[in-house]
Amino acid sequence: MASVTDLMNAATGGGQEESASEESDDQKESEESTEEPPPEPSANPVQPILEAEPDQFLESDFSTSESGDAPQQIQILRESLNNRQAALEDSRRRLAHAQTLLKRLDNEYRSFELRLEKAGLNLTVDYARLLRQRLDRLNSQTIAVELTDGISARLSAAREEQLRLEEYEAISDNDAQQDSSQVRQELITLLHGAVTEHIDVLNEYYNTVTELRTRFDAYQELLQQRLFWLPSSDRVGPDTVMDLYQGSIWFISNFHLEPVTDALRHSFAERTIIILVLLAALIFLLARRRVLRQKLVDCGQDVGNVGRDRMAATFTAGGVSFILALPGVLVLSLAALMLKEGNSFFSALSSGFSSAAFVTLLLESLRSVARRDGLGERHFKWNGPSLAAIRRQIPILLAVLTPVVIALPTMDAQEGAAFDDSLGRLLFITTSVAMAWFAWRVTRAVLHAALDRKFLKSAQVLAVATPLALAVAALGGYYYTAVQLQGLMFISICWVAFVILLYYLCLRGLAVRERRMTLKRLREQRIAERKMAEAREAAENSGEGVPVAFDMPEMDLEDISQQSKSLIRILAVTLALYVLWGFWADVIPALQIFDNITLWSIGGDAEGETSVAITLGDLMLALLAGVGTLLAVRNLPGTLEVMVLSRVNLEPGSGYAITTLVTYIIVFIGVITALAVIGVQWSELQWLIAALGVGLGFGLQEIVANFVSGIILLFERPIRVGDTVTIGGTTGTVSRIRIRATTLVDWDRKEQIIPNKTFVTQDLTNWTLTDPITRVIIQVMAAYGSDVDKVRDLLQEVAENNERVLNDPAPAVFCVGLGERGINFEVRVFVQDLLDFMPLSHELHSAVTRAFKEAEMEIPFPQQDIHIRSVPISKPMPKSAS
């Protein structure tokens, strides 16, 4: 095993403590760089500075010692003690080694950080090259990944050994042999102490390794951030031309017949199956290319047709577009596989072909989307000239990018590294110019058909100037920075393009659903208007009043469209910015300033609890959560209506209730999330919520009761809009159901506002809840002496001949009693609608009167018999004598 000093020098490039000025430190850095060998090529394996723990766990066989005699038990205990002490010593040595590495790495990191702060960005090219060598050494020498797992496994084994030893000690206390028992007890005590101490050492070793890995990553991150903005090479000058010539000669000289044939032969033998599969797929796609193009055109035939337009056609068009982009990708992938097993040069070319296949997949997919009568033109309604410019310019861009991307990885090989600053830089500048030309041609076509020309003009200048600025930076010596920025820009543009594609897919699905909802609502509106006309006619005949129109709890289609588009736009922008922030946050240190400004801290006490710092970034995230909640509340109902609720066969009002509840849930989640981000804990809010609950219970109980009752009415649906109900002596038609109250329109056309709580707590009669059929009873009286059977048959015929009377249930006539003036009959019939009640009563009474007259039957009139009784006249009393 190498010494601690050697390993530390390899890991950190030599750690001097800051005992001299910055100039002397820089001189030491230069001396180190001359003494140390140059970084090895990337093909070399990574060398860990801390090896993994060996898979060897100490476990004493106490079961054998229990059954053996005393000498055997003592022998086993001594062997276990010796093994444990050896393991303990090895762990101590490893711990000391890790602690030394951590201490020296920490000193080196702090000293280096301080020197960089003093120097700022005023560093030379040679100094930047030294920093890059140090970063290469850190990247090639790291800590074994499985080290912490091995320490954890040893800890678990040691704890188990400790438990077994304690159990064995408890059993051995009953041993009667006193002489051997004392020796055995001493060995058990020593072994128990060794195991306990080993556990402590392993715990400390684990924590040290964890901290060392954290410091190691921080050191690498510091170097990467600083190197990103430092010049990596000299400016382009006359020497660069000679290097460029030599690099071209070197590149061409590597193409010999024998290395190529060896690479092809070995690669084909190693990957025969996958190569043949890709070749078969390529032949199949080329043979079916015309069919696929026609399929792409056919997928757009029904776009815009409300009756036949389906989102499945768009997904099919997307799949076909992706398949049409694959032939070039498969060719490059086959080339990458066929050169995989070659020498270092052809292995680097294989990596280049793989990268070129990825770039080709992205650009060809975009070109497939822009095909004539394809996904962009037919389904997304994109601008035609812009699509034509994309179709023309992508092959030109690929013709430049493909050979450049293939050749660039050869600059990373051991021999090609010397030509990276010349030949590699030329290839990079060529790529930048090609991308600037592509951006100019495409944005120019977009600009001609755009309305907001001012914004797009600025975007055009930015898109064209950025690649050119990177090319200039590469010429000025910032080649590494320009390469990294260009790669991030390419990935960012691809990500933005993917988000835009998702955005238009969502808009396309939204448009299909909106057109279907519009057609469905038009049909429902016609049916509702016809029913309303019939209801008005029936009301006019019955003399009752009905609402002019019902207020159905549903959203306007225009509001739905605006809310849905706004929400989709917000989600797309948020998703794009979130991922882009992750791409660029590590590159631009200014983006991390929000996480470095601490506003306040929460937690922490005298008992050692760690406090949590709330930064400016946390506050901005909380504000973002609040704004996002507000936007979601404003725009979610429309999206929920068009994308979810419209697909479910819900009764009127249920969708309104669902969107209302979802809105309140979103508000609750948003508030809790925002408060949690800024450190407000539930334990601090529970008393406030309890007090608020008490206040609601006393002051707003009626409002809360009506709100909950409204939710119950909308979900349970004991009443619906258009139902005829009777509650509290009021009968009318339900015209509006809201969260707090329900509106009834009585027969006098007066609107009655009734709190929802009333419908839940009081008796309610719904005449039309499940069955609008209502029974009507007509009282008829026949004179005494009439034939009862004949009267019944006559009334039965009258009821059956009326068109308003239902045949099922059938009408019925009964003789129900003998009255003072005649024989009482009841005609019991059923009507389809409650509004037919009065017209039917009128028609039946009129028909009965005519039928009795034609049958010469008598309907008795009210009569009163007056009996006159004669009273004898009494004689006058004689006058009394005075």
Image: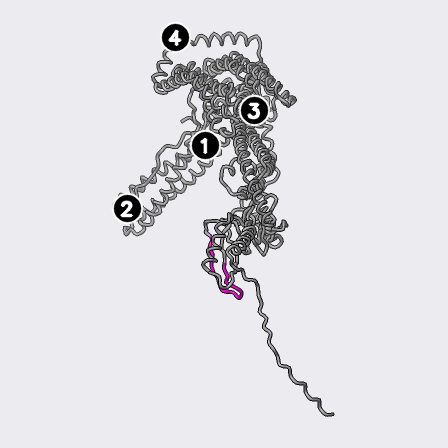
Q: Which mark is residue 697?
A: none
| Residue annotated with mark 2 | 66
Q: Is residue 74 left or right of residue 742?
A: left
- In this rendering, the answer to whether 524 lies above or below 251 is below
**Kind of residue sitting beneath label 2:** Glu
Q: Is residue 55 left or right of residue 749?
A: left
| N-terminal label among 3 and 4 | 3
Q: Nearer the viewer, mark 2 or mark 3?
A: 3
| N-terminal label among 2 and 4 | 2
Colouring scheme applied when the structure was drawn:
one colour
| N-terminal label among 2 and 3 | 2
Q: Is residue 32 visible?
A: no
Q: Main secondary structure of the magenta part?
A: strand
| N-terminal label among 1 and 3 | 1
Q: Is residue 785 visible?
A: yes
Determine whether the residue tagged by mark 4 lies in a helix, strand or loop: helix
- In this rendering, the answer to whether 870 lies above or below 784 is below
Determine whether the residue tagged by mark 3 lies in a helix, strand or loop: helix
Q: Tell me the quadrant of the picture where the C terminus can be found.
A: bottom right
Q: CA distance from mark 1 to mark 2?
A: 40 Å
Determine whether the residue tagged by mark 2 lies in a helix, strand or loop: helix
Q: Position of residue 150 (x, y in %)?
A: 39, 34
Region rendered in magenta: 811-825
Q: Which mark is residue 257?
A: 4
Determine whether the residue tagged by mark 1 lies in a helix, strand or loop: helix
| N-terminal label among 1 and 4 | 1
Q: CA distance from mark 3 to mark 4?
A: 44 Å
**Kind of residue sitting beneath label 3:** Arg
Q: CA distance from mark 1 to mark 3?
A: 27 Å
Q: Which mark is residue 98?
A: 1
